[in-house]
Image: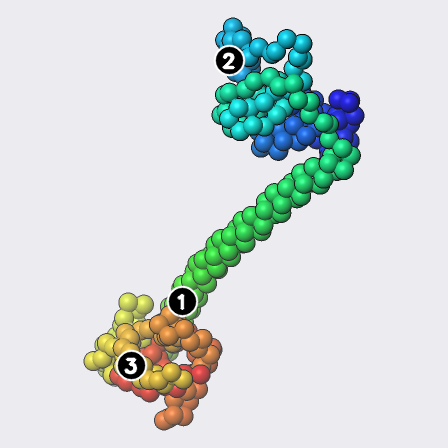
């Protein structure tokens, strides 16, 4: 009978053989083994072995206790729990019941417990399968919840990373625009110096020619004019229009209303667009000036407000 029960637990139910053998040993039958397996399904074999060792020690300590005596001629065929009235085929089943319920009052009984029929076995197996399926389903639902939470964390992290990248890209674009502006100014200064040097050399050759001609003709040479210093990178290339102003006041017309902002005159149009995007969330493609009619697109974003003639004030339509 035990061998058949072991085959059912291992081959039919899929339990590990050591766990199934221990379940039958602790319970004494298929029904008790199923109850034992259900109770200990979340425990490892190490934990179960430790519990069995402790139980054995307690049983050895209580070995002096004598069971209730039977009447003459009677044979004990089962054990009964006096606390709840439940009967058990073996001492192992009674011990399992005591550990599970904390009941301590048992006595021997002459009433024999009939073994489970095939129908009862099938019903018990079906019940256990359903409980296992419900547990797996609960774990599956928890896995879905955990997966959803992990996906939300991943998306949040990705968005934060993307925002940081976009912010760094904007700052890099501002730096590039400023570098191009400085490069353009340096190039203008170099061209001006070259033109001034050519003009100075030409004037020097003209004066030398006139001096030589005067010497040949025996007359006094013409006076030498004062030398004009060449422009340097530290000085201005040309006179600044509206040089008294240090800020430009802009009236920006957006789809959500008008925005009044003041910027230093050296602010680039790209920086103005970035400031508007940061404050209002508007992706600026171009600015339009009605009078005089002019459209400032991405090509003009590297120029300053002063270079674009938007000082001291201007009204722009944001596109």
| Whether label 3 touches label 2, CB < 8 Å | no
Residue situated furthest top in the rendering? 64
Of the 4 image quadrants, the one containing the N terminus is top right
Residue at 29% in and 81% down = 260
218 to 281, vertically: above or below:
below
Expressed as whole percent of the image width and height from the top left, the position of residue 189 reads 36, 72
Mark 1 surroundings within 10 Å by alpha-carbon count, few (fewer than 14), some (14 through 19), many (20 or more) = some
Picture quarter containing residue 173? Answer: bottom left
Would you say residue 311 is visible in this rendering? no
In this picture, residue 11 sits left or right of residue 59: right
- The image position of residue 109, as x and y in percent, is 62, 19
| Residue 58 image label | 2
In the image, residue 186 above or below residue 310? above
| Residue at the (47%, 57%) spot, across then down | 156
Q: For residue 250, what is the image quadrant? A: bottom left
Dot 3 falls on a residue whose secondary structure is strand
Q: CA distance from mark 1 to mark 2?
A: 80 Å
Where is mark 1, residue-wise?
174
Which residue sits at x=33%, y=79%?
305
Q: Is residue 58 visible?
A: yes
Residue where numbered disc 3 is placed: 260
| Mark 3 → mark 2, Cα distance in angstroms | 87 Å
Q: Is residue 230 left or right of residue 144?
A: left
Quarter location, residue 186: bottom left
* Image depth: mark 3 or mark 1 in front: 3
Reading the chain from its start, which is encountered first: label 3 or label 1?
1
């Amino acid at each position: 009978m035990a061998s058949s029960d072991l085959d059912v637990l291992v081959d039919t139910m899929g339990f590990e053989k050591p766990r199934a053998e221990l379940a039958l040993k602790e319970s004494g039958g298929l029904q008790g083994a199923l109850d034992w397996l259900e109770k200990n399904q979340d425990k490892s074999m190490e934990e179960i072995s430790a519990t069995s060792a402790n139980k054995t020690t307690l049983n050895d300590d209580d070995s002096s206790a004598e069971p209730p005596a039977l009447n003459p001629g009677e044979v004990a065929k089962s054990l009964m729990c006096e606390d709840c009235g439940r009967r058990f085929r073996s001492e192992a089943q009674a011990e399992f019941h005591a550990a599970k319920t904390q009941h301590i009052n048992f006595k021997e009984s002459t009433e024999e417990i009939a073994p489970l029929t095939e129908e009862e076995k099938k019903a018990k197996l079906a019940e256990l399968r359903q409980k296992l399926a419900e547990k797996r389903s609960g774990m599956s639902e928890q896995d879905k919840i955990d997966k959803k939470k992990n996906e939300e964390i991943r998306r949040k992290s990705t968005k934060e990373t993307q925002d940081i990248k976009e912010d760094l890209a904007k700052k890099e674009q501002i730096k590039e625009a400023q570098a191009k502006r400085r490069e353009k100014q340096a190039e203008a200064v170099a061209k001006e110096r070259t033109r001034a040097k050519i003009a100075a050399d030409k004037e020097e050759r003209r004066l030398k020619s006139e001096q030589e001609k005067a010497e040949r003709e025996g007359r006094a040479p013409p006076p030498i004019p004062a030398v004009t210093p060449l422009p340097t990178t530290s000085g201005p290339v040309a006179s600044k229009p509206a040089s008294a102003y240090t800020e430009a006041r802009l009236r920006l017309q957006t789809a959500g209303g008008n925005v009044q902002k003041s910027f230093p005159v050296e602010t680039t149009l790209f920086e103005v667009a970035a400031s508007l995007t940061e404050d209002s969330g508007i992706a600026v493609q171009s600015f339009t000036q009605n009078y005089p009619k002019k459209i400032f697109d991405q090509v003009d974003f590297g120029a300053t407000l002063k270079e674009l003639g938007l000082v001291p004030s201007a009204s722009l339509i944001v596109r």
